[in-house]
Structure formats: C-alpha cells, structure tokens
Image (tube, helix red, strand yellow):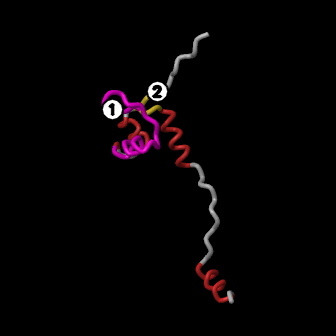
Amino acid sequence: MSAAPMSTQYLTIAEVAAAMRVSKMTVYRLVNSHAIAAVRVGRSFRVPEDAVADYIRRATEPATLAPKPSAPEQDAQDARDSP
C-alpha cells in the first residue's frame, strides 16, 4: 500500500507578500519568528499555501475575553468606600 502523493503548493516570499498585501520584509520576519512555517531551499524560502491560511486563521480568531477593567470613576468610588 503506497501513500498518496503530496499536492502541497509552495509559494515564494514575494507571492506570500502579494497575497497578504504586506512587504516581503514582513513575510521574512514572520518566517524568522516561526509565525509562518517555511522550508528553506538553497538560499531562499518556500511557504506552503496551508501555512499562510493557518496564519491568517490564527490572526483573525477572536481573542479570549479578558475581564473588563474597571472604570476610573469606579476605582475612585471604591477607594472612598474603603475604611
């Protein structure tokens, strides 16, 4: 039984930058910080299309809700109510 061939498409840094509408330097920073997975081929990088989609999905997910900070007026009222 043989495995199915991989059909992953790889993009250049310039193609990723154009698709995301950012500069190539921004894509290099994302690759170097491991925010986007990439494969080094010789002296250049190739980014799987799936990695770009995953990055965008993670970046656009709603953040977990943190407790709402109290208003300054409430803090002042609490301070006056304290003994």
Asked if 22 appears above or below 12 in the picture, the reply is: below
Residue 60 locus on image (x, y percent)? 55, 49
Mark 1 or 2 closer to N-term? 2
Residue extending farthest to the left is 43
The vertical placement of 67 against 30, above or below, is below
Percent across and percent down for residue 52 are 48, 38
Depth order, front residue of 19/4: 4
Q: Nearer the viewer, residue 72 or 53?
A: 72
Q: Residue at x 43, y 29 (%)?
A: 10
Image spot of residue 3 (x, y percent): 57, 15
Badge 1 amino acid: Ser
Tell me, yes or no, whether the highlighted magenta stretch contains residue 41: yes
Q: Which residue is mark 1?
A: 44
Identify whether 7 is placed above or below 47: above
Q: Residue at x 41, y 31 (%)?
A: 39
Residue 33 is tagged as none
Measuring 65% from the left and 85% from the top, which residue is drawn there? 77
Q: Which residue is mark 2?
A: 9
Q: Quadrant of residue 28?
A: top left
Q: Which region of the structure is painted magenta? A: 25-46
Q: Residues within 10 Å of mark 2 (few under 14, many from 20)?
A: few
